[in-house]
Amino acid sequence: MSEYTVIGYYADTMQRFADIAAAANPEEAERYIMNKYIGVSICGVIEGRHQCVDIHELVRTEEA
């Protein structure tokens, strides 16, 4: 098993999201996170443990 950082956001609130999952592959990590956090939209899966350091709590759009 490897560790994967799964990055996404909650579509209903636009709040950004990141968590670590131990899985056999990226697809399994994504499925695990989607089952653990209902309503999260996945943007990407990165192999390894990564700390997100962006300063914005919410997804920014052209209107925001």
Image: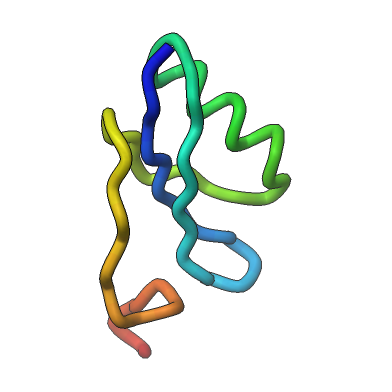
The residue lying toward the viewer, choosing from 40 and 19, is 19
**Residue sitting at x 53%, y 48%:** 41
Q: Please state the horizontal and vertical placement of residue 49, each as a whole percent of the image.
A: 32, 40
Q: Is residue 64 left or right of residue 17?
A: left
Q: How is the image coloured?
A: rainbow
Q: In the depicted view, which residue is nearer to us: 39 or 28?
A: 28
For residue 15, side relative to residue 60 (left or right): right
Q: Residue furthest bottom?
A: 64
- Image quadrant of residue 38? top right
Quadrant of the drawing holding the C terminus: bottom left
Comparing 22 with 44, the one in front is 22
* Relative image position of residue 33 (x, y in whole percent): 59, 36
Q: Quadrant of the N terminus?
A: top left
Does 38 sit above or below residue 24? below
Q: Is residue 64 above or below residue 32?
A: below
Q: Is 13 drawn above or below residue 7 in the view shown?
A: below
Residue occupying the point 45% across, 77% down: 58
Residue 5 appears left or right of 32: left
Q: Position of 20 compared to 36: left or right?
A: left
Numbered label tally: 0
Q: Is residue 60 above or below residue 19?
A: below
Instruction: Say which residue appears at 62% left-offset and 36% top-offset.
Output: 34
Where residue 26 sits in the image (x, y, percent)?
38, 21
Q: Residue at x 45, y 53 (%)?
A: 18
